[in-house]
Image (cartoon, grey):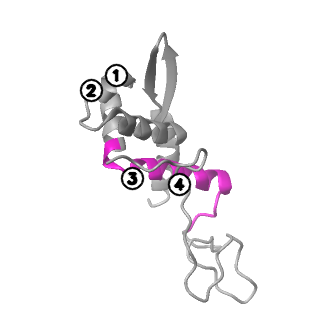
């Protein structure tokens, strides 16, 4: 079974609907006299303030890419093989069709977890472990 096509630039954008009878959250601070909602920074609290739309989009893209076992496996194989492999070498390691593997690689590339270079007629995929550590590691560090 193949993956559904993802719109360009919105690979991992997830929309969370509001509860019935509740307006969608726009990330604005609570009104005076109203308690901050979950996830908002509270002065003197242990929460971290939101860093802005770019960081939130990076988190969504990276964690969205990591959500699928095949993509995590691709990253692990790239890491074990020195961080760089051709598309053919990656495809040979998986039982799924090339279009499915290609779709997984595109999701990883849109998330910034791999870069693609053309060498002759071959696409070479390189793991960007710095991006993984920067985005996912920074998020995990918020918890201790």
> On the picture, is 101 further left or further right than 17?
left
Q: Which badge, 4 or 2, comes first in the chain's sequence?
A: 4
From this view, report whether residue 4 is shown above or below residue 48. Answer: above
**First to last magenta residue range:** 47-70
Where is residue 55? Give x, y as percent: 61, 52
Q: Are marks 4 and 3 in contact (CB under 8 Å)?
A: no
Q: Are marks 2 and 3 in contact (CB under 8 Å)?
A: no
Residue at 40% over, 48% down: 3
Location of the C terminus by quadrant is bottom left
Q: Which residue is denoted by mark 3 in the rendering?
A: 67
Secondary element at image label 3: loop
Q: Are marks 1 and 3 in contact (CB under 8 Å)?
A: no
For discs 4 and 2, the disc positioned in front in the rendered view: 2
Q: Which badge, 2 or 3, comes first in the chain's sequence?
A: 3
Mark 4 to mark 2 CA distance (whole Å): 29 Å
Q: Which residue is denoted by mark 1 in the rendering?
A: 88
Residue at 71% over, 75% down: 29
In the image shown, does 125 or 32 lie closer to the viewer? 125
- Badge 1: few (under 14), some or many (20 or more) residues near its Cα, within 10 Å? few
Mark 2 to mark 3 CA distance (whole Å): 22 Å
| Dot label at residue 92 | 2
Q: Which badge, 4 or 1, comes first in the chain's sequence?
A: 4
Q: Are marks 4 and 2 in contact (CB under 8 Å)?
A: no
Q: Are marks 1 and 2 in contact (CB under 8 Å)?
A: yes
Where is residue 15? Give x, y as percent: 56, 65
Q: Which residue is denoted by mark 4 in the rendering?
A: 60
């Amino acid at each position: 079974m193949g993956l559904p096509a993802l719109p360009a630039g919105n690979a991992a954008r997830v929309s969370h609907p509001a509860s019935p009878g509740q307006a969608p959250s726009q990330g604005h601070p609570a009104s005076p006299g109203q308690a901050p909602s979950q996830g908002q920074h509270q002065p003197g609290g242990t929460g971290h303030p939101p860093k802005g739309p770019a960081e939130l989009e990076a988190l969504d893209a990276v964690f969205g890419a990591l959500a699928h076992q095949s993509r995590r496996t691709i990253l692990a194989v790239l890491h074990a093989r020195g961080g760089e492999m051709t598309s053919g070498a990656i495809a040979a390691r998986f039982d799924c069709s090339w279009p499915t593997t290609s779709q997984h690689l595109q999701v990883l590339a849109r998330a910034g977890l791999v870069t693609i270079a053309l060498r002759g007629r071959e696409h070479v995929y390189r793991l960007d472990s710095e991006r993984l550590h920067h985005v996912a590691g920074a998020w995990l560090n918020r918890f201790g």
